[in-house]
Image (cartoon, rainbow, N blue to C red):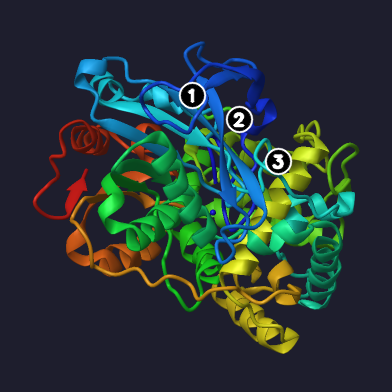
Amino acid sequence: MKQSRSTRAAWIAVSAALLGLAAPLTTSVPASATGPSIDWGGCEGSGLDPRQECATVEVPMDYADPGGRKIDIVISRIPSDKPAARRGALLMIPGGPGGSSLNDPSGKGQKLPQDVRDAYDLIGFAPRGLAPSTSVSCGLDHGDLATSKLRPWPAPDGSVTENMATARRTAAACARNGGELIRHISTVDEARDIDRVRAALGERRLSAWGVSYGTYVGAVYSQLFPHRTDRVVLDSNDNPDPSRVSRAWLAGHETGVEDTFPEFAKWASAPGNRDRVAETAAEVRPLFLRLAARLDRAPIPWPGANPEELNGNVLRQTMLDSLSSPSRFPTLAKLMLAARNGTVPPAPVAPPEPVLQNVAAVGAATLCNDVAWPTSAAEYQKGVTKSRTEHPLTAGMPRNAMICAAWPYSPRQAPVRITAHGPSTILLVQNERDVVAPLSGALKLRDALGRRAVMVTVDSTGHDAYLANGNACGDRVVSRFLATGERPNEDTYCA
């Protein structure tokens, strides 16, 4: 579930990179020898590496009708730092769904070791539906763009009635405002777009670094086009269960929170911590649950926020977001301290509403078009009630109804089943404690890939392992694989 610096959890990813989207300028330069069908030009946006170029690749909106309407996929590139050592192209597949990697060649791509940057052109892209590629919007009400609303948190008493009403309202808005394209946004469509990008780049095979939801995209691409893949790194891995797909990712938050919250509790009770919330780690969990319950009963007004109150579900959503990286732990601690005092911090700064609308539409379309979700309120209520008892920190949200419960369109193709068929060129890297993509789900992808993959499990906390929240041992293994193709002979643990 998110993104250069994304909040991909279940389904919406809003990246800092999205605030400065890059797009091709109106004037372009002729394509280099890399590919005959790409005209590289400048990129719009701030803070970009001056070497980054942008271009547009035209793809079919509907792959069942390849001669029909076309849409644009905007891509970016920073060429190899050492053309004599160049191996090919490394596509950075973003999280989300709803994330973009368009600015990643200028961003996290520059954290790659020099020998990796020598070996590859770094390629980013804005997936179909996401600006500046041909874009979509559902035109949701402002209140329905709140992350605590987009995520299906039940009512304080555990009822899903309001969630079902929200699902019907938001799904109807997508059907009304999303146009024909919203029916053609899915993981399989994205994988096919990637192969069109590969061909346009003039590459016989494509290397990839997929993060979070991008691991599922990368796995699907490797399944559909096994002999067009080179070295593939899948980082912070999603459960590929073909019967549930995104429902399994949402359900995984139960385990992810239980795996990760103890690390927050240790940090939040450490002596000398300026944001210390308790004297001992054992006190932090009950304190959080008491605060959430109090805010369920008596929300605190929060002008400028969406919603404009700090309620129990906003606190729970902040927990989910903050556990994605130890660097975000202070955000949760500060909110807990404020809530205990009956106050609120300054309202968080939200991206521009058109960006939120666009990301929400792409996220909804992908999750709902990938697999059919149940439509019965009773089925969701049963799951929520059980989940609230077993996992009180997540309060039933991972089993609840979201927009897909009322999605008006049926999936146009069955989910792809990930198998061990294909070349053995995949390396999985996975933090042991990941709230968004827990280890238990990553092991499902590892099992599905069989002999095609080797997995490096990292003794670290946070989402996004490689060059982010992992450790030096894991980073070395991944960098060596990208630069040389050398992988461990078997699954490895990086302490």
Question: Disc 1 marks which amino acid?
Answer: Gly
Q: Is residue 398 visible?
A: yes
Viewer-nearest of labels 3 and 2? Answer: 2
Q: Is residue 68 left or right of residue 347?
A: left
**Mark 2 burial class by Cα count in 10 Å: few <14, some 14-19, many 20+:** many
* Whether residue 160 is situated above or below residue 306 in the rendered picture: below
Circle on res. 335: 3
Viewer-nearest of labels 3 and 1? Answer: 1
Circles 2 and 1, Cβ within 8 Å, touching? The answer is yes
**Residue at the disc numbered 1:** 107
Measured Cα–Cα span from mark 3 to mark 1: 30 Å
Measured Cα–Cα span from mark 2 to mark 1: 9 Å
**Mark 3 burial class by Cα count in 10 Å: few <14, some 14-19, many 20+:** many
Question: Disc 2 marks which amino acid?
Answer: Ala
**Sequence-first disc among 3 and 2:** 2
**Residue at the disc numbered 2:** 17
Q: Secondary structure at mark 3?
A: helix
Q: Which image quadrant is residue 474 in?
A: top left
Q: Nearer the viewer, residue 199 or 239?
A: 199
Residue sitting at x 71%, y 75%: 405
Q: Secondary structure at mark 1?
A: loop
